[in-house]
Amino acid sequence: MKIFYANGKLLLMGEYTVLDGAHALAVPTKYGQGMEVEANDSNTIRWKSYDADGSVWLEASFSINDVVRNNTPEDSNTTMLIKVLHAAHTASPDILTSGFDVVTKLTFPRNWGLGTSSTFIAMVAQWFGIDAYKLLADTFGGSGYDIACAQHNTPIMYTLENGLPKAKPINFYPAFADKLWFVYLNQKQNSREAIAAYRERTFYKQDLITRINGLIEAVVTAPDLNSFASALEKQEALMAGILGIAPVQEKLFPDFKGVVKSLGAWGGDFVMAVAEENPVEYFKGKGFETVVSYKEMVL
């Protein structure tokens, strides 16, 4: 049996603009996904995926020939599964010499949006011994920062340089990390739809990139909580103007004593809250039960 693992991800700064060459500040999470692969003699891939609560969210069985020929059924989950395996097989055709029993297990609830797909891509790439960024580009698409988090055990500064991924490990663990929290907004956001909406906006790209990079530098080097929070607020205001969307704090938490910043695709998944006092009861009072401290979340 072969065992693989990949970290989940959170994009703290640089959402959307990372696609256009801006820096992105991203952190791997203590949550992730594991995969066990064991050969069988059936010429069939038997696949079972477990959510964090132990429930099965995907179960499928298909032949090696289905993967080789990219024969995909109508079921969307299985379609993407076979598509990814087909792309991996195309890159490394010597792996699927037999059938396999494959089991994947998430350590975070699938609806949290911490990287069910990116951890899957990273683990399949490990299994086939291929480039995970290339596999992502051939299947789901995206900037690739999530793949970088899957493969790194420290915060990273991520950039696309001439379309090529560059992930630089950085020393980023704020002295005031006990004042930082992650709040799940009770809905998963579709990143592809959010990116498409961003692409439809008109703005001066290079000016935006310069400003975003400056704010990320301010966050990484912030000497205190106020400086950190100020840079977050400025990026929220800047991106709100670009996206034509009100900041999440304005929409959902106008009375919050602190700063709330969207993470990743705006409108779902997690936000980051900055507060002097523990904000758990505040968010629970608003109906948001999942509040995770920075220490609990970030690897």
Image (cartoon, rainbow, N blue to C red):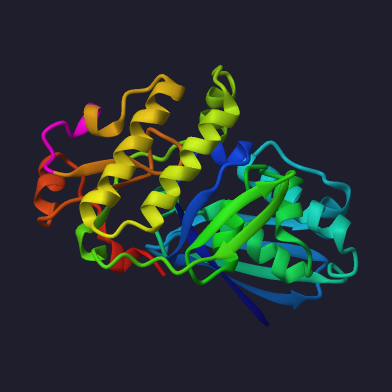
| Residue at (83, 51) in percent of width and height | 66
Relative to 264, 98 lies left or right? right
Q: Position of residue 259 (x, y in %)?
A: 22, 43
Depth check, front residue: 284 or 155: 155
* Above or below, 89 relative to 244: below
Residue at screen point 80% across, 52% down: 87
- Left or right side of 25 for 65: right
Locate the C terminus and report the quarter of the image it occupies: bottom left
Left or right, 203 with reference to 172:
right
Q: Up-down: is 202 above or below 1?
A: above
Majority SS type along the magenta span:
loop
Residue 183 coordinates in the image, percent (x, y): 27, 49
- Location of residue 222 in the rendering, given as x and y in whole percent from the top left corner: 32, 56
Q: Which stretch is magenta?
A: 251-257
Residue 91 position in % (x across, y down): 86, 58
Vertically, is 223 above or below 203? Answer: below
Quarter of the picture containing the N terminus is: bottom right
Residue 121's quadrant in the figure? bottom right
Looking at the image, which is closer to me, 169 or 296? 169
- Height in image: 279 above or below 46? above
Residue at the spot 29% in from the left edge and 51% down from the top edge? 228
| Residue at x 26% of width, y 59% of height | 292
